[in-house]
Amino acid sequence: MNQAVNEYDQEPIPGLPEIPPEGERILWQGTPGWQGLARHAFHVRKVAIYFALIFLWFLASKLLGGQSLVQGLVLGTWLLALALVAIGLLLLLAWANSRATLYTLTNRRVVMRFGVAVSMTINIPFSQIVSAGLRRYEDGTGDITLSLIGRPRVSYLVLWPHVRPWRFGQVEPMLRVVPDAARVADILSGALQALAAAKAEAAPAAATSQGGGTDPSTPDLSAVSSA
């Protein structure tokens, strides 16, 4: 995986740091929805439930202490204000990340452009993808995870939130809350299979000259599977 561009000023094609070479074509481009990022990456719903439970506990403790409901609500105003600020900031981060992110799938690579404070573009050639996985959500969006050969040179923190959660040792880039995820997964699967087919055509000649063997860089085409 190559870290191609930091703090780019202009893109010849949106989402790509350079004009694609001859023979490479864009198959799909898309951005994560900010509502999906808020829910699945920034966990706004869980944070709201957490603050609601804290507020109910605070209110119950005041009532048990002999104070009236109105007094408890007034005293808990600061907690409600804190909850609104926290949730508002998370929603703002989700919106900003959605605007700054553009995923591109070509017939040769996956390109991820992201970053709010510092913009960055990551190229992931198909030759480095071992397998891909799909996690679908009820609204039709989904996360597409890419398992790579070796250890990526870009860290978990740099990629976040465009990375599979809690995989610190073997970082797995992830296309977050992709719209119409099943269709995008099919496009990726088809592109990976086309690459594998092209390598298979070249394999007999390589096997004759080198004594056989399998190319370890050929993607595992259980390809895009559901998780």
Image (spheres, helix red, strand yellow):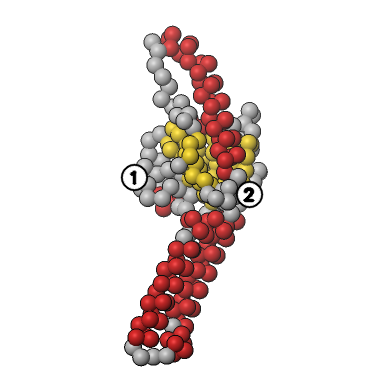
Q: Is any atom of residue 7 visible in this view? A: no
Residue 196 in the image: x percent, y percent?
A: 51, 24
Q: Earlier in the sequence, mark 2 or mark 1?
A: 2
Residue shown at the point (43%, 38%) measured from the top left: 147
Residue shown at the point (52%, 40%) measured from the top left: 123
Q: Quadrant of residue 106?
A: top right
Labels 2, 1: front one: 1
In whole angstroms, how far apart are the C-alphas of marks 2 and 1?
33 Å
Which type of secondary structure does the marked residue at label 2 adopt? loop
* Residue found at the far top of this picture: 208
Residue 217 in the image: x percent, y percent?
A: 44, 27
Q: Which mark is residue 10?
A: 2
- Label 1 crowding class (10 Å Cα cut-off): few <14, some 14-19, many 20+? few
Q: Is 26 situated left or right of 193 in this image?
A: right
- Residue 58, compared with residue 25, is above or below; it is below
Q: Are marks 2 and 1 in contact (CB under 8 Å)?
A: no
- Label 2 crowding class (10 Å Cα cut-off): few <14, some 14-19, many 20+? few
Q: Amino acid at mark 1?
A: Gly
Which type of secondary structure does the marked residue at label 1 adopt? loop
Q: Amino acid at mark 2?
A: Gln
Task: Please tell me which residue lies in front, 8 or 193.
Answer: 193
Residue 81 in the image: x percent, y percent?
A: 49, 78
Task: Please tell me which residue lies in front, 184 or 218.
Answer: 184
Task: Please tell me which residue lies in front, 141 or 173.
Answer: 141
Q: Which mark is residue 137?
A: none
Q: Quadrant of residue 22?
A: top right
Residue shown at the point (57%, 58%) measured from the top left: 35
Q: How many marks?
A: 2
Q: Is any atom of residue 87 visible in this view? A: yes
The quarter of the image holding the C terminus is: top left
Q: Which mark is residue 169?
A: 1
Residue 194 in the image: x percent, y percent?
A: 56, 25
